[in-house]
Structure formats: C-alpha cells, structure tokens
Image (cartoon, rainbow, N blue to C red):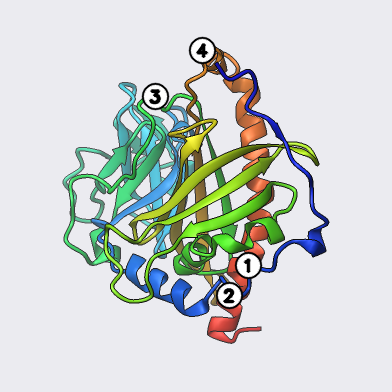
C-alpha cells in the first residue's frame, strides 16, 4: 500500500527550466481549437454550481446576452427561464420564490415552470449533481439534445468544488488556454513542476480518437515535495475542456473547465464566465473521510483554482485583445 502520495524532487530555478516555446506550436494549438469548436453541444450552457441554485432566492446570470433566472422548487427540481418579467421588464432576480413559481416584486405577476404564456416560456434545464445547465436553442443554433455532453467523471462526485470567474474574452480564448498545456510550469510554477507533454493531436486529421493531449506533471505541494501524475486533456463539447488523471494519486479525478458566453459588457467587449469544477477521487481507504471534511476542503480547492485562473484569465484576455485588436 502506498504510504504517502508525496514524492521529493529536486526543484529547478524557474529560469533554468527547459523552454517549451518550440513545443507549443501555434499551428497545432490553432488546429486543436478549430476541431474543438466543431464539437456538438446540443445548445447546453453551464450557468452555475448546482449548490448555487437554491429554494429561497433566484439565481441570475446572462448567457449569450440573455438574462437568465434559475431557482429550485420545494421538491429540489431545477427551473430556469428568462430573467425579465414579461409585464414591464422587472428583474426576476429579485422575485419571490414560491415552489414552482416566481412572483415579481413590481406588480405580483406570477411566472413559473408550467407557464404557457407566450411572453414568458421556461427554458430546458439540467442538473448533473455538480453543475446546473440551461439549453438555449436560439443562442446555440444547433440540433438540440435532451442532455448536455458530459466527459468522464468519477462514479462518486460528492467531493467537488466549483469556482466561477468572469473575463473579458470569448469562450474560444478560454479553450485555447487549456489547449496549451506547455505553459503550465512556466506560468504557474507555484502549482506545477516537471511538466512534460507526451502526446499531442496531429496538426491535420484530428479525430475523436486522437484529439487528446497527454502529459506527466508534478502537482507542487512545497518547494521540493509534489504529487506526480499522468493526465489527459479532452474536449467533450466546444466550450469545455476536461483534465482527467489517468495514473498516480487521485486517478479518475477530473477538472472540468466550462466557458459560458455572457454577451457584451458596457465597453462592447465580450464577457465569458469560466466555471471550473474539480471532482476528486482516490482509491485510498482514508478518502471516505473527505466527505466529512468537505466544509474545509471546498474553500481550499476553490482558493487553488481561483489562483490559477487569475493568471490564466490574463492569458485568455490577452489573446482576445490581440485577436480583436482592442486596446
């Protein structure tokens, strides 16, 4: 039995790492991005963590420039619909929740899951136990599906954390960031060491079978202690990248990065919500205790993901700026 997942390694000075710019081929990254953007999504968009949608108050966001409001009935069922009251446009984000319905605070108009009024129609929603999704056919413009396209996950998803950030970019800029694994140890030296990309997709002829990036990396715990793993990056849909640990401590664990277009901000630039989910798994007997420790673990998991994404958002926003030539 493994005593500890930690291994000691000899840390390198940051500037003495092997440069990866020759491996990070812009043409390959662009080819992988183009292929990912052709994946079907069924018009599904992640809006929030499942835990963020509650019974006592609505949850509001925007997707593709459309106001969205979501809430839960007393039964726990997820309900989603337009965020503006059809009467005079009041924000339903401030509505009162009454089981299957929302009651507008401006004039008391009631709208809900069973509403058949042509002016306010519910949207299809989906709760996978970790994330809440909405289907917007008018925004996606694809052939709709009954459920989102999900990548591989552990059988037990209890130990998870969801982090949400908003950046000035488009979803493709977020996906492009993840399709460049070579930046990991250079841009995030506080988290990654000894990162080696062992397999990439071809520049031509990318398919479902060969589109994954494979790599080995050590997740840094201290300056000279880390957890070595082998992992893969895959694109289950055009706005999602999943990193799954294939070998090493936590095999089966996944990090899902979902990029949801929000629309344009006041400056006319695109806004994208990054909703990242870490779902932990371990074959260690003691992992069962992680369920009881979730109130402590979740903030730590969220803090680590937020730190990484503050850096990666700079990467995505810079890419968007260069691509659109906005200053």
Label 1 with label 2: CB-CB less than 8 Å: yes
First in residue order: circle 3 vs circle 1: 3
Which residue is tagged 1?
Answer: 315
Q: Are there few (<14), some (14-19), or many (20+) residues within 10 Å of tag 3? A: few
- Tag in front: 4 or 3: 4
Position in image of residue 111 (x %, y %): 29, 42
First in residue order: circle 4 vs circle 1: 4
Which residue is tagged 4?
Answer: 285
In this picture, residue 294 sits left or right of residue 193: left
Q: Is residue 302 above or below residue 31?
A: above
Which residue is tagged 2?
Answer: 319
Q: Is residue 106 visible?
A: no
Gap between marks 3 and 1, in whole Å? 33 Å
Position in image of residue 296 (x %, y %): 65, 22
Q: Is residue 222 above or below residue 296?
A: below
First in residue order: circle 2 vs circle 4: 4
* SS under mark 2: helix
Question: Residue 156, which numbered label?
Answer: 3
First in residue order: circle 4 vs circle 3: 3
Gap between marks 3 and 2, in whole Å? 36 Å
Q: Nearer the viewer, residue 251 or 56?
A: 251
* SS under mark 3: loop
Give the residue displayed 70% in from the left and 61% down from the top: 186
First in residue order: circle 3 vs circle 2: 3
Position in image of residue 221 (x %, y %): 72, 36
Q: Are there few (<14), some (14-19), or many (20+) residues within 10 Å of tag 1? A: some
């Amino acid at each position: 039995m493994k005593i500890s997942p930690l291994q000691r390694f000899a840390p390198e000075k940051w500037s003495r790492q092997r440069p990866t710019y020759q491996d990070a081929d812009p043409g390959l990254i662009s080819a992988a991005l183009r292929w990912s953007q052709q994946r079907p999504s069924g018009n599904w968009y992640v809006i929030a963590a499942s835990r963020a949608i509650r019974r006592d108050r609505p949850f509001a966001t925007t997707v593709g420039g459309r106001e969205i409001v979501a809430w839960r009935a007393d039964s726990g069922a997820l309900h989603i619909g337009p965020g503006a009251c059809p009467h005079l446009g009041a924000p339903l984000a401030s509505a009162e929740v009454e089981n299957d319905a929302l009651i507008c605070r401006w004039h008391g108009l009631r709208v809900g899951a069973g509403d058949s009024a042509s002016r306010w129609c519910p949207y299809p929603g989906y709760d996978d136990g970790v994330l809440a999704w909405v289907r917007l056919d008018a925004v996606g413009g694809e052939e709709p599906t009954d459920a989102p396209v999900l990548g591989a996950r552990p059988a037990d998803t209890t130990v998870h954390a969801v982090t949400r950030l908003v950046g000035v970019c488009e979803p493709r800029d977020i996906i492009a960031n993840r399709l460049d694994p070579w930046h990991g140890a250079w841009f995030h030296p506080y988290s990654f060491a000894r990162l080696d990309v062992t397999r990439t997709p071809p520049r031509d002829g990318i398919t479902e079978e060969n589109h994954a990036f494979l790599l080995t990396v050590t997740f840094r715990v201290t300056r000279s202690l880390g957890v070595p793993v082998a992992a893969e990056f895959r694109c289950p849909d055009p706005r999602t990248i999943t990193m799954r640990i294939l070998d090493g401590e936590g095999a089966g664990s996944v990090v899902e990065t979902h990029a949801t277009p929000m629309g344009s901000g006041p400056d006319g630039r695109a806004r994208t919500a990054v909703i990242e989910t870490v779902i932990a798994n371990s074959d260690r007997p003691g992992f069962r205790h992680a369920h009881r420790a979730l109130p402590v673990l979740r903030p730590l998991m969220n803090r680590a993901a937020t730190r990484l994404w503050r850096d990666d958002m700079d990467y995505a926003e810079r890419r968007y700026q260069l691509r659109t030539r906005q200053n």
